[in-house]
Each structure stands twice: as C-alpha cells, then as structure tokens.
Image: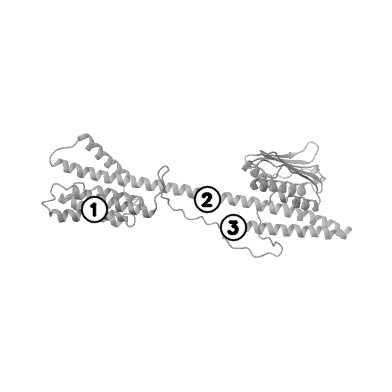
Amino acid sequence: MIQLPPIREPLPGIGGLRALSRGELAAADGLVAVVLTALFLALPGPAWSSHGGWPLRLALAAAMGLPLALRRTGPGAVCAVVTAASLAASASGAVREPFLALALALYQVAVTTSARRVPTPAVGVVSGGVLVLLLISGSPGGGGQDLVLRLAGLAVAGMAWVLGRAVRERRAQAARAARRVAVEAVSEERLRIARELHDIVAHHVGVIAVKAGVANHLLATHPEGVGEALRVIETASRSALTEMRQMLSVLRAGEPEPDDPDDPAGLRPAPGLAALPDLVAGATAAGLTTDLHIEGTANLPQGVQSSAYRVVQEALTNILKHAGPTHCRVELAADGRELRIAVTNTGGAADRTPGRTDHGNGHGLIGMRERVELFGGRFEAGPLPDGGFAVRARLPYRTTTGATTNVWSTE
C-alpha cells in the first residue's frame, strides 16, 4: 500500500516576503514581550500608587508581558499566566491596558488548539457588538473611561480569539487540499501502473496464446516447427516477467531488486520509440508481417515516446488476437508540433468472422484513448471499408530544440 507523507502546516510568507523561520518568530515574540512590558510600565493605571506602588506594577507588567516570549512553545500555560496577571492588574488598577497582552495570548491558543466547545461565532458577535457600541458612544469622562478601556480590551481579546480560529481553519483547509492533491497523484499513478501492466500482460500473453495455438496445430503434422513456436513463447514469457518486475518495483518502498542474470542492465526507463524495432520483431516472430516507418521523431519528449510505444504495442496485440497472422503497417511521423501514429492491417480470416471485426471494445482501446487524451491529442479506431482495421492517433507536444528529420523504415 502506498503511504502518503505527513502534511506539515507551512509558515507562509506575505506577498513576496520570505517566510520567517521558527527562530526568527521566537525572536519576534521576545521583542514583542519586552515592548509590551515597557508599555505597561509607561502607562500606569489610575490607582497604581494606592495598591502596592512600583513593586506591584512592575510585577504585574512582567507577568503580563514577558511570558509572551514563550507563547509558541507553551500557548496554554502562557495564556493562563497572562490571564491571571491581567485580571489582577484590572482589579488593582495598576495598568491602564490590562487586556492587551491577553489578546496576543488568546490568539496563539486559538491557532494551535482545537477548543471545539468554545462558541467562537458567539464570541465574535458579542465582541464586535461591544466594539461598535463603544465607538458609537464615544469616550466618557471621569471614572467611566477606565471601564470603557477594560471593555474595549476584552472585546479586542475576543476578536483576537476569532481571528486565531479563522487562521487555524484556513490552515486546516490548506492541509486538506494538499492531502487531496497527494491522494489524486497517488490515484493517477496507480491508474498509470494499471495501464502499463495491462499493456504488458495483454501483449505478451497474446503472443504466447497465438504461438501456443500454432505449436498445438503443428505438433501432429509438422513437429519440426514446434521448436520455433516454443522459442517465441519463451522469449515473450521472459520479456513479460522482466517488464512486470520493473513496473511492480515502483510499488516497493525503496527495496532494491535482486540482480537478474537475464537483465544485467537492471531497472530501465519506460520504453520509447527506440524499442519499437524489438516490438515489431516480436510481432513478426508471432506471425505478423509488419512494416515500420518512422520519420522526424528525434526530439520527442520521453512521455510522448512512452505513450506512442504503448499505443503501437496495444494495436499490434489487438491484431494478433483478432486478425491472426496478417500484414500490418506501423507509421509514426512528427513535424515539431504533433506526432501522428497509424497502425493498419489488411485483415485476415479471423477478421471476417462475425463478432470479431471490431478488434475488441475492452480495456485496450480505452487505455489507448486515455493515453492520447492525456496529452490533449485525438484518437480514432475502426474497421476499414475494404477490410482490416486501423488505429490512428495524434499526440501534440512541445520541444525546446528544433525537430530533427530522421527517416527509418523496415520496408
């Protein structure tokens, strides 16, 4: 089973700015803590001198401001200390803005903890309503001003909590979206592997089935021809095992494949157009008379080459299964913008059998169509007016270098 990597919440930057590291964020928190402590000392409350004087004011300012330097490492404990100190400062009147530090502490708690039981929407509505009412009513004189400052501080703390919850939800949505992308990537990879395995198995097993039938037919009348059929079956079987082992190794969690004496090169990349002569040779050994013509394909991207190879392979497999030994022509031509593929056969005895002229409507044609449409190309397949069957595809592509003309034909 393919395991997805864990999703870590990023620390995004703003606009084009670089995202801060954890050390830089800790340094920023330390600076904020020192600035707030100095601010609390510089803005005394109305009754600071009658409730302990400077010692109490200094202790409360330090208890409210300095713990914020550790708010990312222990948000819950920091919030508890700051809350207790803020309530004490509000009750004693030692600090004018006692709930400013509480807003920063609550924000960090809201961002880092679940706290699903807290009615965040209600907190937002009440805090916003209090702020609006305070703005409308203006600033009263006398002792009422201290009450207004305390209510405003509590409302700001409530809005800080709401903002923290919103940030947490946004990060959670981003993490879920990233995980969905990872799951879709894994699903696409599994689908690609399934298509590759289908192409490998269908081609080689098709060749084996055809040659086994030939061997069975020749066994009684021409036993000397059985050896050639068995050699083709052996070659197709070995090729199928090698390609399947290479493909299935993708599913292993980094385990190296044991050395294979029949494959000293080890794992190889997906086959491209350079492997088409071997593919045609295998089809010829299975009984097909195949003409191969390639033109202008020197600079094709590897993905286009791999898809073109599988399209030709599946087309030849269909001919072997449904038309039997016959003549076919494989043409590939690229002009720098698109690769044109055509695989046609003139038809055989099996092709004229009712129900066998469609060359199958199963996964073979579906897989070819999906491969072509993956590149935004066009695919068509169907019987020819004079008998036989044709598979045609167009694969658009882009290349960084100019198209190099190369012409190669087995005719």
Horizontally, is 11 left or right of 219 in the view?
A: left
Check if mark 2's residue and mark 3's residue have beta carbons within 8 Å. Answer: no
Residue found 67% across the figure and 52% down from its top: 198
> 32 or 180: which is nearer to us?
32
Q: What residue does disc 3 label?
A: 251
Horizontally, is 348 left or right of 275 in the view?
A: right
Q: What residue does disc 2 label?
A: 183
C-alpha separation, residue under disc 2 versus residue under disc 3: 15 Å
Residue 401, x across and y down, in percent: 64, 42
Residue 63, x across and y down, in percent: 23, 55
C-alpha separation, residue under disc 2 versus residue under disc 1: 45 Å
Residue 81, x across and y down, in percent: 25, 56
Image quadrant where one finds the N terminus: bottom right
Tell me, yes or no, if residue 282 can be seen here. yes
Label of residue 64 in the image: 1
Image quadrant where one finds the C terminus: top right
Tell me, yes or no, if residue 117 can be seen here. no
Residue 403 sits in quarter: top right
> 192 or 8: which is nearer to us?
8
Q: Tell me the amino acid under the disc marked 3.
A: Leu
For marks 2 and 1 on the same chain, the one whose residue lies earlier in the sequence = 1
Label of residue 297 in the image: none
> 70 or 370: which is nearer to us?
70
Check if mark 2's residue and mark 1's residue have beta carbons within 8 Å. Answer: no
